[in-house]
Image (cartoon, coloured by chain):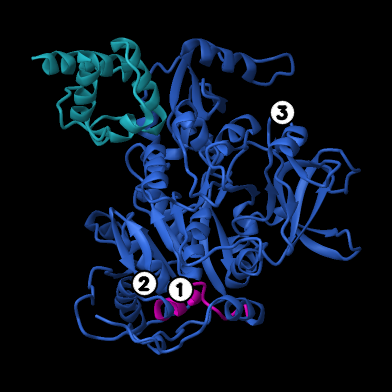
Chain colours: A blue, B cyan
């Protein structure tokens, strides 16, 4: 089947001009993908579950989903995608985007109760790509669209103007992060936020991406970095290689980096910690860009990695979901990073062009240089509020460096600025931790444990022998012999489950009457 | 015969490592079949196996382990060499 090009845009200059002139509020984030389907129909667009799909093949799948939604009597502002780690999941996201609605990823590995909480909070009335009857039966008043009615093999030509934006919603997607109250918290991200984020790459000559590039996509679709890893290659006619979510994940990642000679990799730093033992055996001369995001990056380990990716530029990014994927960057090099790293932690660098930041004290006052303060962000990538206007206290009016009063998002991350003007990360002001890149509110886990037991307990984030963050639950006595991991799995996603549960006679406290984490850490390491 | 002995030894290692006396290994066993055999535990498990058999697996070898059968093949070639 051949798709006739109906709009022969030349890439390069035209693409850049297009981004600059774009009315950000009106353009679906799948728009450049749609252009590329006619520019590069035979290029490989995506590799998933051991096979490639060309842009033309992917477009067929997208259109079959799009046309079902578009032909429905009802208009849908927000549409759930039941994420099942297959081509249909990715095609569904593209179809929803071209339809003009916001997509809301629902992870099929999450407990049903958690997905129901998301459906309710996002006020979803339709879901694409769910073939699971047990899930469907639990969802009332939802219209389900199948993604399996494939038009491939038919002779029908899909033209660009077959895609008409049916909904004029300004939201691109809604993602849910861990919330302190025991319920997930919705972050509604607009198309304007997303295009401002992508303009950092698309308008930047420093990123010489081409249609021949091969990107890796290792993230769950409920984690916003996946949107960069998936959409960035499709914006430029390149190919996205999706790693399976099951099995030994970091080995699958290494396998794909090697086998498909990936040129642009975006990983969480924990991958390097897992493979440290084998780094010497790696050689990836084909890699052009190696990006890290989602957690603290250690200088010592990235230094070893750098020797194995000799032709790559290494960049450490930082960005909460509320600031749309990434908003600061630090280009790594051995000597500068050695000098600038704080306790072996690589700086998070300088803000993107669209981002303004300010560091504040705990009474919302700007702090002096070199001091550590809470990082607050403002600019076109920052969401205007949480879903349903919850947690409004995280958004504050502050005087920016230019003297104007602007709305800033309080990240909860502690940072300082070094003499080179780079931001350094110093941890959190609250009990939010990072587990393999995922944001986890310890208070949310506690809330769920409280529903199971009256015993005294403490849940914390501790380093294991490889210095990787792990969630550990300490419980006094546990006379009812509850299997906490199993019980919590009914309501929390896997990354929020304690890796181990340790039963103690008494949880140790220090002289400040706080739980003695140092003692617990020692206990944990001695326990093996 | 030797492969069967290796399988029995591996089963003991797996049972101790995952603290689960009910694990029954076959050549077809994969990560999907055993609770908590995941990214977090995999390399530690490999280290336990390396120590027990006094061998070292390269990254390429580790990447090839798709089930217990592959692991036994690789171990057997090392034990016999």
Q: Position of residue A242 (x, y in %)?
A: 38, 54
Q: Which residues are magenta?
A: A23-38
Q: Position of residue A449 (x, y in %)?
A: 47, 32
- In 3D space, how far apart are the residues under numbered discs 2 and 1 (Cα atoms)? 8 Å
Determine the chain carrying the residue at label 1: A
Which sits in the foreground, A47 or A461? A47
Is there a contact, CB below 8 Å, between mark 2 and mark 1?
yes
Q: Which mark is residue A343?
A: 3
Q: Is residue A29 magenta?
A: yes
Which sits in the foreground, A29 or A306? A306
Q: Nearer the viewer, mark 3 or mark 2?
A: 2
Q: Which residue is mark 2?
A: A55
Q: Is residue A129 visible?
A: no
N-terminal label among 1 and 3: 1
Q: Which residue is mark 1?
A: A33
Q: Position of residue A411 (x, y in %)?
A: 70, 49
A6 relative to B53, above or below? below
């Amino acid at each position: 089947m051949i798709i006739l090009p109906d709009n022969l845009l030349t890439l390069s200059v035209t693409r850049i001009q297009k981004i600059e002139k774009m009315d950000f509020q009106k353009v679906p984030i799948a728009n450049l993908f749609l252009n590329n389907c006619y520019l590069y129909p035979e290029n490989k667009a995506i590799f998933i579950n051991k096979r490639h799909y060309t842009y033309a093949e992917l477009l067929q799948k997208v259109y079959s989903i799009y046309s079902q939604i578009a032909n429905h009597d009802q208009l849908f502002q927000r549409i759930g995608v039941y994420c099942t780690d297959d081509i249909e999941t990715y095609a569904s996201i593209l179809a929803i985007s071209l339809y003009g609605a916001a997509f809301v990823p629902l992870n099929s590995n999450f407990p049903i109760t958690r997905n129901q909480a998301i459906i309710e909070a996002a006020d979803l009335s339709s879901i694409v790509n769910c073939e699971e009857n047990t899930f469907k039966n639990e969802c009332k008043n939802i219209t389900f669209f199948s993604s399996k009615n494939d038009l491939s093999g038919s002779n029908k030509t899909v033209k660009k103007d077959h895609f008409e934006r049916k909904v004029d919603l300004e939201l691109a997607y809604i993602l849910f992060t861990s919330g302190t109250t025991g319920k997930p918290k919705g972050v509604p991200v607009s198309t304007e936020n997303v295009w401002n984020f992508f303009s950092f790459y698309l308008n930047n000559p420093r990123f010489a991406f081409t249609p021949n590039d091969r990107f890796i996509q290792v993230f769950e679709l409920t984690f916003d970095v996946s949107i960069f890893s998936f959409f960035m290659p499709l914006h430029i006619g390149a190919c996205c290689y999706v790693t399976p979510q099951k099995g030994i994940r970091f080995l699958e990642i290494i396998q794909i980096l090697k086998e498909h000679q990936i040129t642009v990799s975006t990983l969480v730093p924990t991958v390097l910690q897992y493979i440290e033992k084998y780094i010497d055996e790696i050689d990836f001369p084909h890699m052009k860009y190696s990006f890290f995001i989602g957690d603290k990056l250690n200088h010592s380990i990235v230094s070893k990695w750098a020797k194995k990716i000799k032709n790559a530029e290494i960049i450490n990014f930082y960005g909460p979901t509320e600031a749309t994927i990434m908003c600061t960057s630090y280009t790594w090099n051995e000597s500068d990073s050695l000098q600038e790293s704080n306790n072996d932690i690589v700086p998070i660098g300088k803000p993107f062009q669209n981002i303004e930041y300010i560091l504040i004290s705990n009474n919302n006052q700007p702090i002096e240089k070199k001091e550590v303060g809470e990082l607050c962000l403002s600019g076109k990538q920052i969401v205007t509020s949480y879903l349903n206007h919850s947690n409004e206290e995280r958004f504050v009016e502050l005087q920016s460096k230019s003297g104007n009063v602007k709305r800033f998002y309080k990240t909860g991350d502690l940072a300082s600025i070094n003499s080179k003007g780079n931001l350094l990360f110093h941890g959190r002001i609250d009990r939010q931790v990072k587990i393999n890149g995922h944001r986890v509110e310890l208070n949310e886990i506690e809330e769920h444990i409280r529903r199971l037991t009256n015993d005294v307990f403490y849940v914390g984030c501790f380093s294991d022998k490889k210095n990787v963050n792990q969630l550990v639950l300490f419980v006094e006595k546990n006379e009812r012999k509850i299997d906490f991991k199993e019980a919590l799995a009914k309501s929390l996603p896997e990354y929020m489950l304690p890796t181990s549960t340790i039963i103690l006679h008494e949880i140790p406290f220090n002289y400040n009457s706080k739980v003695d984490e140092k003692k617990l850490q020692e206990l944990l390491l001695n326990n093996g | 015969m030797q492969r069967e002995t290796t399988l029995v030894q591996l089963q003991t290692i797996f049972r101790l490592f995952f603290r689960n006396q009910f694990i029954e290994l076959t050549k077809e066993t994969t990560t999907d079949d055993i609770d908590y055999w995941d990214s977090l535990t995999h390399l530690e498990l490999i280290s336990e196996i390396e120590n027990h058999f006094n061998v070292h697996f390269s990254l390429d070898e580790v990447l090839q382990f798709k089930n217990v059968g592959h692991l036994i093949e690789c171990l057997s070639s090392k034990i016999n060499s």
